[in-house]
Image: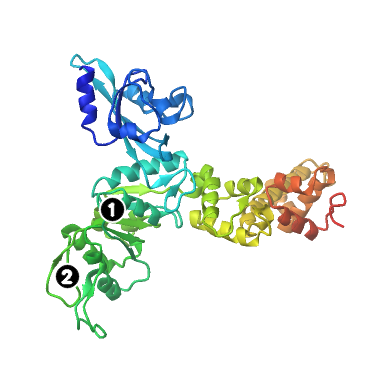
Amino acid sequence: MNISIIQAMINAIDKPAIFISPNYVIEAVNKPYRDTYPVDIKLGFSTCYHVSHRNNKPCNECGETCPMQESKKTGRAANAVHIHATNEGQSYCDILMRPIFGSAGELLGYLEVLDKLTFASNSPSPGKMIGESEAFKAMLNKINRAAKSDICVLLQGETGAGKELVSQALHSASYRANKPFVVIECTGLSDALFESELFGYEKGAFTGAFSSKKGLVEAAEGGTLFFDEIGDVPLAMQVKLLRLFETQTYRPVGSTTVKKANFRLVCASHKNIKAMVQRGEFRQDLYYRIAGFPIQLPALRERPSDIPMLATHILSALAEKKRLHKTVLNRLSTYSFPGNIRELKNIIEQAALLANETTIREHDLPESIFDEATDSATDSAVNNSSDNTFNRAVNGSYNSTSTTLTAANSDAFLKENIMTLEHAEADYLKQVCRNYTGSVEELAEALNVSVRTLYRKLQKANIKIKGAFS
C-alpha cells in the first residue's frame, strides 16, 4: 500500500485522522486533524505525540497509556482517552488506534482516529464534566461510545455522583443533540400521576382535566427521555413502561388512539437494580430492556485526584471570587464524601460564605467534614489504649506479678478496668501532648483533625500545650 492510497483513505474519514509509522512519525493527515491543532504538521517528520501533547517523547514515557503500545502487544485495535493541546486549549479526545497490515501480512503503520469529547474538561468549564483521573477517563470513553448509538443506557452510581450530567452528555454527544432533552423524576409519583405526566391526557379524562395536555413522552419527540431514579417506579407501572420501551407506542389517559413515540432512552438509579430484580422489587424483563449499556459512575472517593479541580470549578461559579488554601485541598482530598459531588458543592458554598477573607481556610469548612477524621482518631486511641491496658495486665503491670491470666479472668479484668471512649481519647491526647514540641496547627495536622476540633478536644480534656491556651 503506497502513501497516496493511504492519504486517500485518510481523506475519506470525516473525523480528525492520521496515519503514523511504528515509530510515531505522521505519514498522512486529513484536514480535520490539521484544523484541530495549532501546529504545522510536516509529513515524514512530525510525531503524533509532539503535535497532540507538545511532548518530546511518547505518551507511555510521560505517564499516560499509549494506544499504539497496546496495539503492538495485541495486534488489534486499541483506544485511550487523552487530553490534547488543541486550538481550543486543553481538550479531551477519545483515540482509536488501528494497526494497518500489507497484503503479505506485514505491519505498515497505524491509523489514528479522534473523537473530540466536548462534554468534558480538565479545567473549570460551565456545564461540562470535570476531572482527569483514570476512573473519570474510563467513564468518558463509555459515554462517548454509547452516545454514538441509540442503545438504552442505564447509569448506576451513588447519590450525588453526577448521573444527570452524564445523561446530558449522552444527549449532547448524540445525533439527537438538537432535539429535546426531557427529565422524568420517578421518585414520589403515584401510579395515576405518573401515567398522566408520562403519556398526557385528553379533555375530560378525569375530574379537573378541563383541556388536553401533552405528556413528557411526546415532549421528547426525536430527543432523549431521561428517567431519573427509575428504581422508584412502582411495580404496577413498570409493565406500562416496558410496553412503551419495547413498542415505542403509548396511549394518552382517556384516549383510544395509540401514538407512536420517537426517543432515546437513558435511565439512572442509585439503587442496585439487579439486586431489586432478585428480590422481586423490579421486573426482570424491564431491567434487561433498560440496561442495554450499563455505565457505573465512580464515587468521588474513587477519584480523589479530581477533588481539587472540582472544588476550583465550583468556586469559579460563585459570585464572590475566592480561593482555597492548600490545607483545605488536602483536607478535602482525604474525606470520603458520602454525598459525592453534590456534597462537595455544599461544603464549598458553605465555606465560601463563612470565610472572612478571600482565601478559604480549614476553620471555614463545616464541622461535619472533620467528624470522620475525629472518629478515626478516637478509634485509634481506643485501640491503642485498650491494647496497652491488656499488655500491661499480661506483663504484670497491675501488681499481679505471679498471676497468669486465662481467657476468663482477662475478660473479668477488662470489665473492671475498661475505659470510656471519652477517657481513652483524653488519655491518648495527654500522652501525645506530654512530649510534643510543635505548634497546635502542626499537631492538628498530625492527628488529621482541624485546628478548631483539636482546641475543642484539648479544652474538654483540660489539656494545655506550652502556653497555647491563655
Label 2 secondary element? loop
Residue identifier under label 2:
251
x, y percentage for residue 256?
12, 74
Residue visible at 28% across and 53% down in the picture: 177
Residue sitting at 70 percent across and 46 percent down?
A: 445
Above or below, 264 relative to 240: above
Q: Are marks 2 and 1 in contact (CB under 8 Å)?
A: no
For discs 2 and 1, the disc positioned in front in the rendered view: 1
Q: Percent position (x, y) of residue 139?
A: 39, 44
Query: From this viewpoint, is residue 417 visible?
Result: no
Is the residue 87 above or below the residue 55 in the image? Answer: below
Crowd around label 1: few <14 · some 14–19 · many ≥20 (10 Å): some
Instruction: Give the image quarter of residue 53.
Output: top left
Where 22 falls versus 431 (above or below)?
A: above
Q: Label 1: which residue?
A: 177
Counting from the top left corner in percent of width and height, residue 462 is at 83, 58
The label on residue 287 is none
First in sequence: mark 2 or mark 1? 1
Residue closest to the eye, 182 or 290? 182
Total number of numbered discs in the rendering? 2
Residue type pointed to by label 1: Ala
Q: Amino acid at mark 2?
A: Arg
Separation of disc 2 and disc 1 at Cα?
A: 26 Å
State the colouring used for the structure image: rainbow
The answer to whether residue 360 is seen in the rendering is: yes
Label 2 CA crowd tier, 10 Å (few <14, some 14–19, many 20+): some
Quarter in which the C terminus is drawn: bottom right
Above or below residue 141? Residue 211 is below
